[in-house]
Image (spheres, grey):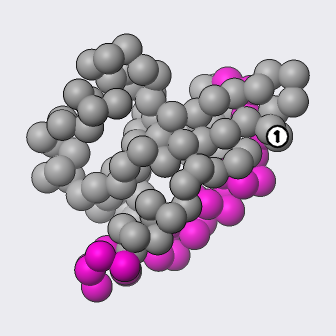
Amino acid sequence: MRIISETRLKRFLASSPRRASAEKSVKRWIRLTRDAAWKNPADVKLTFGVTADFVESDNGSELTVSDIHNNAYRMVTAIHYVKTRPAKGRVYVLAIMDHAEYDRQKWKRDF
């Protein structure tokens, strides 16, 4: 899968020393995602198990919320599957946030 945009993840990690501690977890997520060839949400669940949930935004977009760094952070992504060529799929990183930010659910209105 192609990840768009890793820059957002790098900015998140650089934003504070506390967030920088999640670097190993973020790199693991990147590695697993790059190596994946998902055709559907079930494939994502096979890769990430209970740490990935599927939600609908207030605008009707299908989003994936992943627990990062032992559930300290939540990453919101939009996955575009290419069923005939799964390795060509794209994962759009929309946001990564702590639980306080996530619980405000502003992200549900934005995406």
Residue type at the position of mark 1? Ala
Q: Quadrant of residue 22?
A: bottom left
Please give the range of residues in magenta: 14-40
Position above or below: 16 against 96: below
Q: Position of residue 104 (x, y in %)?
A: 12, 40
Residue 107 covered by magenta stretch: no
Q: Residue at x 18, y 36 (%)?
A: 105
Q: Is residue 50 visible?
A: no
Q: Residues within 10 Å of mark 1 (few under 14, many from 20)?
A: some
Q: Quadrant of residue 96?
A: bottom left
Q: Residue at x 16, y 42 (%)?
A: 103
Q: Residue at x 17, y 50 (%)?
A: 101
Outermost residue, bottom side: 17
Q: Is residue 29 visible?
A: yes
Q: Quadrant of residue 107?
A: top left
Residue 34 covered by magenta stretch: yes
Taking depth in this image into account, of 76 and 109 the one nearest to the observer is 109
Q: Residue at x 51, y 64 (%)?
A: 7
Q: What residue is shown with label 1? A: 87
Q: Position of residue 3 (x, y in %)?
A: 63, 51
Position above or below: 100 against 46: below
Magenta span: helix, strand or loop, mainly? helix
